[in-house]
Image (cartoon, rainbow, N blue to C red):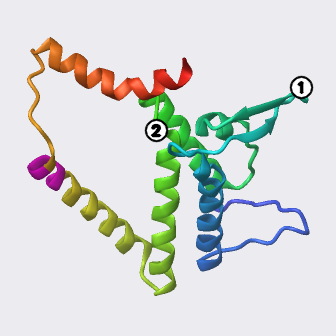
């Protein structure tokens, strides 16, 4: 079955390494936009809302909601932040910066003519190794029936988010 693709005369279709590098550049650009919003010395970004008002924020998710992008890879990065916010409710800035760094590292391997599937399998192996390391050497057993201990954990997790709002 053949498909028909109708393109504007000025449109050119790119493939291969050019597209890979463009996708990486778009993903890194999104990460660079909100990189300065992370941490105790985060900087505020000035945004203009649709009504012409000005909003100052260092909330990465709020910034990403206001960005209007057309590039598919940049849209994917923003979707990663939305998913993180929906599933966890926090960490959107961190996950975007981490994804940008992973793209940056992958770019070096693509330049060395390494196939993308090899890079992905190396990332998966690194994830497995890290989970094993965290489980075996870093994690601490928690008694989920101990209410006092569980409240202490929950307070330390959500405390930073709520304290910053009040």
Q: Secondary structure at mark 2?
A: loop
Q: Identify whether 158 is placed above or below 33.
A: above
From the viewer's side, name the closer residue of 148 and 130: 148
Can residue 135 be found in the magenta stretch? yes
From the viewer's side, name the closer residue of 98 and 58: 58
Looking at the picture, how far across and down is residue 8, in whole percent? 88, 62
> In which quadrant is the C terminus drawn?
top right
Identify the image quadrant of residue 22.
bottom right
Would you say 138 lies left or right of 68 here?
Answer: left
- Total marks shown come to 2
Name, please, the residue furthest toward the bottom: 112
Q: Identify whether 14 is placed above or below 114.
A: above
User: Which residue in the protein does label 1 denote?
Assistant: 51
Would you say 35 lies left or right of 6 here?
Answer: left
User: Which residue in the protein does label 2 denote?
Assistant: 91
Identify the image quadrant of residue 18.
bottom right
What's the residue at 75%, 51% (across, down)? 70
The prevailing secondary structure element of the residues shown in magenta is: helix
Distance of mark 1 from mark 2, alpha carbons?
Answer: 28 Å
Range covered by the magenta-colored residues: 132-137
């Amino acid at each position: 079955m053949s498909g028909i693709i109708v393109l504007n005369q000025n449109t050119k279709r790119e493939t291969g390494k050019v597209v890979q590098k463009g996708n990486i550049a778009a993903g890194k650009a999104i990460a660079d936009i909100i990189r300065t919003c992370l941490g105790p010395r985060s900087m505020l970004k000035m945004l203009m809302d649709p009504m012409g008002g000005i909003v100052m924020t260092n909330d990465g998710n709020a910034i990403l909601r206001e960005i209007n992008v057309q590039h598919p890879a940049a849209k994917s990065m923003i979707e990663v932040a939305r998913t993180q916010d929906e599933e966890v409710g926090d960490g959107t800035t961190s996950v975007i910066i981490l994804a940008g760094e992973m793209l940056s590292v992958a770019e070096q391997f693509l330049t060395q003519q390494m196939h993308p599937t090899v890079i992905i399998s190396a990332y998966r192996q690194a994830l497995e190794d890290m989970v094993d390391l965290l489980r075996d050497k870093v994690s601490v057993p928690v008694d989920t029936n101990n209410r006092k201990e569980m409240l202490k954990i929950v307070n330390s997790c959500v405390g930073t988010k709520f304290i910053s709002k009040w």
